[in-house]
């Protein structure tokens, strides 16, 4: 597998205004979230430090933060392994998501501003336009749709205007995003944005009952697809000859 952050003179292209640890962390995190660094893949301090022309200190800090995000786990020899989520963990996480996002949608119905509604409309319009286009490379389109999907959910979270809820959601955000990468590749993409459009309309009308029902259905459907994918991967692995 190609290492997504292994590029010529990687260290020379880094932004000097942002700490090296932050940049290494973001680069690896985004690689995991986008599925470019696969579950189970091991990263070693020496290798990553060499790729970034860095010492091991910022790499060690980046690895520590990835562990805190539950995106990786510590292994021997000074490295980390990208977390492999089992079906039970994913099921538990989606139950938690339903609880948190139900609360988020209820608060958003009460507190969302006209500017935030407009932001949701713009995000949705961009996604629908992208889905209609036939001249964009599929991988580029999927990456952009992933970004728009995340922006849509983040706008709803921000519309709660609840710092405490935002903090809780942030704690599981990275793992949720990594699973969204799976879902956005498995879902009927058009249907995802039909559902997003409906959620947006209920928010604009401040129709809490229908918005809650729809977000629960939306999350539950994603959970079913991701769990089916994980179980199929596990079955395929077990079926491989020794």
Image (cartoon, rainbow, N blue to C red):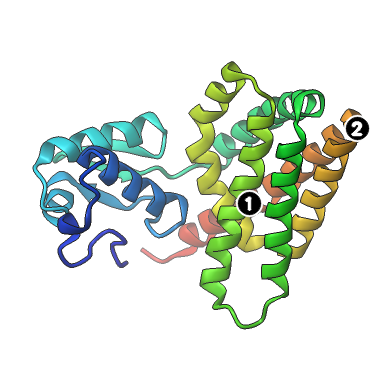
Q: Does residue 29 lie above or below 171 as drawn?
A: below
In the image as oriented, which residue stretches furthest toward the top?
Answer: 164
Residue in view at x 63 percent, y 19 percent:
162
Q: Is residue 133 left or right of residue 106?
A: left
Residue in view at x 80 percent, y 44 percent:
200
Front residue of this view, candidates 175 and 226: 175
Question: Residue 177, image x and y in percent?
Answer: 53, 45
Question: Residue 110, image x and y in percent?
Answer: 81, 23
- Report, in whole angstroms, how far the alpha carbon at label 2 lies from the one at label 1: 22 Å
> What mark, if any, has residue 15 been given in the picture?
none
Q: Look at the numbered discs 2 and 1 and tell me whether their residues touch, using CB distance below 8 Å.
A: no
Residue in view at x 26 percent, y 37 percent:
63
The answer to which quarter of the image holds residue 13 is bottom left
Which element carries disc 1, helix, strand or loop? Answer: helix
Residue in view at x 13 percent, y 48 percent:
49
In the image as oriented, which residue stretches furthest toward the front?
Answer: 115
Position of the N terminus by quadrant: bottom left
Question: Residue 132, image x and y in percent?
Answer: 73, 74
Front residue of this view, candidates 93 and 137: 137
The answer to which quarter of the image holds residue 7 is bottom left
Report how many numbered discs are placed on residues in the image: 2
Q: Residues within 10 Å of mark 1 (few under 14, many from 20)?
A: many
Q: Does residue 191 lie above or below 214 as drawn?
A: below
Identify residue for label 1: 149
Identify residue for label 2: 207
Which element carries disc 2, helix, strand or loop? Answer: loop
Question: Residue 215, image x and y in percent?
Answer: 78, 39
Q: Residues within 10 Å of mark 2 (few under 14, many from 20)?
A: some
């Amino acid at each position: 597998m190609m290492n997504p952050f292994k590029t010529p003179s990687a260290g020379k292209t880094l932004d000097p205004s942002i700490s090296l640890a932050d940049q290494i962390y973001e680069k690896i995190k985004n690689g995991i979230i986008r599925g470019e660094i696969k579950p189970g893949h091991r990263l070693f301090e020496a290798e990553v430090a060499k790729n970034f022309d860095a010492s091991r200190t910022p790499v060690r800090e980046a690895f520590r933060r990835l562990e805190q995000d539950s995106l990786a786990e510590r292994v021997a020899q000074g490295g980390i392994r990208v977390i492999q989520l089992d079906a039970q963990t994913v099921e538990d996480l989606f139950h938690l998501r339903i609880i948190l996002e139900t609360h988020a949608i209820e608060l958003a119905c009460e507190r969302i501003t006209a500017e935030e509604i407009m932001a949701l409309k713009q995000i949705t319009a961009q996604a629908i336009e992208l889905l209609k286009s036939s001249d964009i490379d599929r991988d580029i389109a999927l990456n952009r749709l992933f970004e728009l999907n995340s922006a849509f959910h983040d706008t709803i979270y921000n519309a709660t205007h609840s710092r405490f809820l935002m903090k809780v959601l942030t704690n599981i955000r990275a793992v949720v995003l990594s699973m969204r990468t799976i879902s956005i590749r498995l879902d009927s993409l058009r249907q995802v944005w039909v559902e997003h459009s409906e959620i947006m309309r209920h928010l604009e009308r401040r129709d809490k009952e229908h918005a809650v029902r729809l977000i629960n259905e939306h999350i539950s459907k994603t959970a079913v697809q991701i769990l089916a994918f994980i179980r199929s991967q596990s079955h395929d692995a077990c079926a491989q000859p020794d």
